[in-house]
Image (cartoon, grey):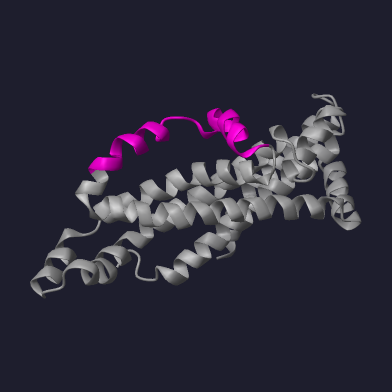
Amino acid sequence: MKSKHFYYILIPIILLCLWQVVSYFKFVSPLFLPLPLDVLIQLFNSIGSGTMLSDIWHTLYRVLIGFGIATIVGVPLGLLMGFSSKIYNALEFTVEFFRGIPTTALFPLFLLVFGIGDEAKFAVTAWGAGLVILINSMYGVHLSKELRVRVAKTMKIKGLELFSKVIFPEALPQIFSGFRVAISLSLVLVVVTEMFIGTEAGLGKRIIDAQLVYQTADMYAAIVMTGVIGFILNKIMMFTENRVVHWKGK
């Protein structure tokens, strides 16, 4: 176990050491790459003063709202597409068409429809994350083990009962895989929209504002905090998956 923990932190330690060496010996100008300690001090000062806490709250709020909408729409629609060949055939072209369009390319469209408020950020996030969840939910049904489905059918289990007792539990591992990708994508999309769609607070706005006035320590501090939030969200999703899908791999 100790060896596992050592290797878990080995790469971050190596990266920090490289960062320290490059910055200390000024291989890159300190204006563009401040010392790690300066970034850490700025991070703690920003949190202690409360200025970054507001940005963290606004970003998290947008991530969770967008991810929530994506889940509410994506899971049922994906399950229906996987379960019904008629619904799949009706929606396949539309889903595959929009799947190939980068979500960021749709920013102008969402701005026209929803304006520059939080509604546009919710819509962009829900759209990008929703496609990921929908596709994983659909393939979760398609990848259900045929043997278990056949056994259930021989036991006269059909229709909604077959779906709820066999197919949906079989699809859950794939659905949670989609959740993990979608929650990370939601954070990325929210931060990007905060940079380029008008907002009063958020980590994305903090990053772009600091970059514009060359407050690079503050910029890196916000970037580090974004990474920490992404890591925590992913770990929460993994913990939830292990508790909910306890039969995974069995």
Query: Is residue 3 at all visible to an observer of this figure?
Result: no
> Which percent across, then down, holds residue 6?
61, 56
Q: Which residues are magenta?
A: 89-115
The residue located at (54%, 31%) in the rendering is 106
Q: Quadrant of the N terminus?
A: bottom right
Residue 146 figure quarter: bottom left
Left or right relative to 231: residue 21:
right
Q: Which residue in the rendered view is the most extreme toward the left?
A: 154
Picture layout, residue 136 above or below residue 155: above
Residue 144 figure quarter: bottom left
> Which percent across, then down, holds residue 22?
78, 30
Picture layout, residue 75 above or below residue 163: above
Q: Main secondary structure of the magenta part?
A: helix
Q: Nearer the viewer, residue 138 or 28?
A: 138
> Which percent across, then down, holds residue 56?
75, 52
The residue located at (35%, 65%) in the rendering is 248
The residue located at (41%, 34%) in the rendering is 98
Left or right relative to 65: residue 33:
right
Q: Nearer the viewer, residue 41 or 147?
A: 147
> Which percent across, then down, holds residue 58?
73, 52
Left or right relative to 239: residue 159:
left
- Determine if the magenta segment contains residue 189: no
The residue located at (85%, 33%) in the rendering is 24
Q: Which residue in the rendered view is the most extreme toward the bottom?
A: 155
Query: Is residue 241 at all visible to an observer of this figure?
Result: yes
